[in-house]
Amino acid sequence: MKNSLGILGGGQLGMFICLAAKKYNIQTTVFSDNKNFSAKEFCDSFLIGSFTDQNLMDKFINSSEFFTIETENIPITVLKKIENKKKVFPSSYIVEIAQNRLKEKKFLNSISGVKTAKFKKIENFSNLESHIKLFGRTGILKSCEMGYDGKGQFLISDKNINNLKNNNLKGYLLEEVLDFKKEISVIVCCSKKNTILYPPVENIHKNSVLRESIYPARISYKIKNEALLLAKKIATKLKLQGILAIEMFLMKDDTLLINELAPRPHNSGHWSLDFCKYSQFESLIFSIFREKLVQPEPLDSCKMINVIGKDYEKKKKLSKKYKFYDYFKEEVKKLRKMGHYTFKN
């Protein structure tokens, strides 16, 4: 039981958490709701089934000293059940905020000096019609829950708004369309005693899916420090212990708006596996099992490229040329992340 970690979710992030844990002699148990999962060959034990299966969940709770997540789409009731007996990092309070775009935006805007895109809660088509006028007759309709990699997002304008007349729009929000210069992200880790920050990386998306991350982000020293300050401010307000990724938009006037929070390791942090002394996954482990964190110490400038969909067919060629990480996904899908590689930039 001592020096053991339970991980909810078994995707590639879970796989990397298992590998980091193994490095420090920490036993891992993965609970996956999918029988074919990336972390299967890398954990010490696993459970497969529904997260709401009480018997399986009781076994899982008894399996480990501490718990973490590799996806925020875990029922909050499940996390709270674990917290009745053990500790989850980050806490269910943080995950609950990050799970819901409306809660997330309200929370972020409650912090002095933190801003997001303008938004409005949507309940019905009448709401949508009136609110879109406030945003110049164009906006992004987003589902409040279960949105990642561009899922649950629709660009709305006068041309297509009437297509939604008969749709149930409860559980959506409307967000202004931003004309930003670039997207950056910062990863913050907190232990009981201290906080560390991974420096900002620049993220490039295609079809709402992250394609590449560039370290260091091509931003000024002033903006870099502002991004780090914002990340630390958000982590402090959340009373974070564990890891948190914060996506930000750099606007044309050089202000920073917060886009999203992810209370888990982040795709944009994969560069740290090869180009930091301590990866984001190691820092997560340290935040749970050590009182004090060590600085990640970036080693060199680099690029991380995601291998998406059919690009996976090039994996042999990529493996010869780069440090390629295979996610061992069961099936190749159009916009699915199948692996990634990094190289000195």
Image (cartoon, rainbow, N blue to C red):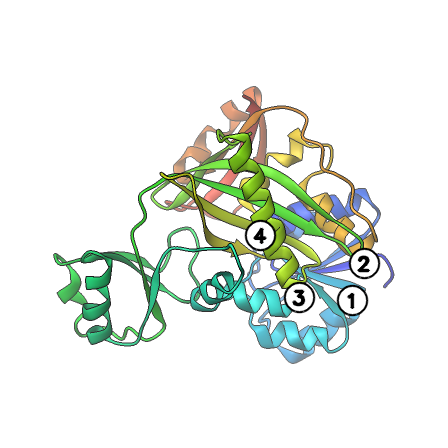
Residue marked by disc 4: 11
What numbered label is drawn on residue 91? 3
- Cα–Cα span, label 1 and label 3: 19 Å
Element under disc 1: helix
Tag 2: amino acid: Ser
With respect to residue 311, does 286 lie above or below? Answer: below
Distance from Cα at disc 2 to Cα at disc 3: 18 Å
- Spatial CA distance of label 4 from label 3 is 20 Å
Q: Earlier in the sequence, mark 1 or mark 3?
A: 1
Circle 4 residues within 10 Å: few <14, some 14–19, many ≥20:
many
Q: Position of residue 304 (x, y in %)?
A: 53, 32
- The amino acid beneath tag 4 is Gly
Name the residue carrying label 2: 4
- The quadrant holding residue 75 is bottom right
User: Mark 4 and mark 2: span between their CA atoms?
Assistant: 19 Å
User: What residue is shown with label 1?
Assistant: 63
Secondary structure under badge 3?
loop
Pick the quarter of the image with the C terminus. Answer: top right
Residue 23 in the image, given as x and y percentages of width and height: 79, 42
**Residues marked 4 and 2 touching at CB (< 8 Å):** no
How many marks overall?
A: 4
**Residue 315: image tag:** none
Q: CA distance from mark 2 to mark 1?
A: 8 Å
